[in-house]
Amino acid sequence: MHGKNVRAHRAAYMLFVGRIPEGKHVLHRCDNPSCVNPNHLFLGSHLDNMKDKTKKGRAVSLKGIKNPRAKLSEADVREIRARKGTSQVDMAKEFGVSQAKICSVINFTSWKHVN
């Protein structure tokens, strides 16, 4: 459209419903990403899309070692928490993660599922 590549569902929305405001996403009531039925499309924010995904059970969160990008093991997390008084910078170097990650482990903002 107008010399730009546009995803089909966004094009359908623009053709049959109207303009898409800046920062808005075109979401699917039917949860079918390839659907272009204008009756199935509605506008929302990125947050609306994430909430809709979670509400409908489509949000997959791989926690801990199930996440392929995890650098720590559950044993590492327990050890970090047991060594709470140790320098976070030193532990970060030892475990190969950032000081911010060590802090989030200690404060249970990450790896919440590990006691």
Image: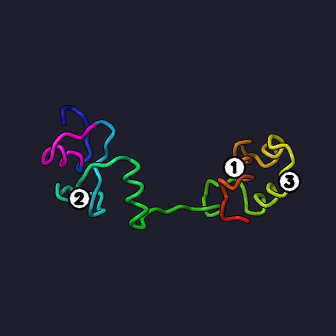
Q: Is residue 11 covered in magenta? A: yes
Q: Residue furthest left?
A: 16
**Among the two numbered marks 3 and 1 on one chain, the one whose residue lies closer to the N terminus:** 3
Q: Position of residue 13 (x, y in %)?
A: 19, 48
Q: Amino acid at mark 3?
A: Arg
The C terminus, quarter of image = bottom right
Point 70% across, 43% down: residue: 100
Q: Are marks 1 and 2 in contact (CB under 8 Å)?
A: no
Point 62% across, 53% down: residue: 69
The answer for how far apart the CA atoms under marks 3 and 2 are is 52 Å
Left/right of residue 104 with respect to residue 17 in the rendered view: right
Point 69% across, 53% down: residue: 71
Q: Which mark is residue 35?
A: 2
State the residue position of label 3: 83
Left/right of residue 101 with respect to residue 23 in the rendered view: right
The answer for how far apart the CA atoms under marks 3 and 1 are is 14 Å
Point 74% across, 42% down: residue: 99
Density class for disc 2 (Cα within 10 Å; few <14, some 14-19, many ≥20) is some
**Among the two numbered marks 3 and 2 on one chain, the one whose residue lies closer to the N terminus:** 2
**Among the two numbered marks 1 and 2 on one chain, the one whose residue lies closer to the N terminus:** 2
State the residue position of label 1: 104
Indicate the secondary structure of the residue bearing disc 1.
helix
Magenta residues (range)? 10-21
Q: Position of residue 55 (x, y in %)?
A: 40, 64
In the figure, residue 21 lies in which quadrant?
A: top left
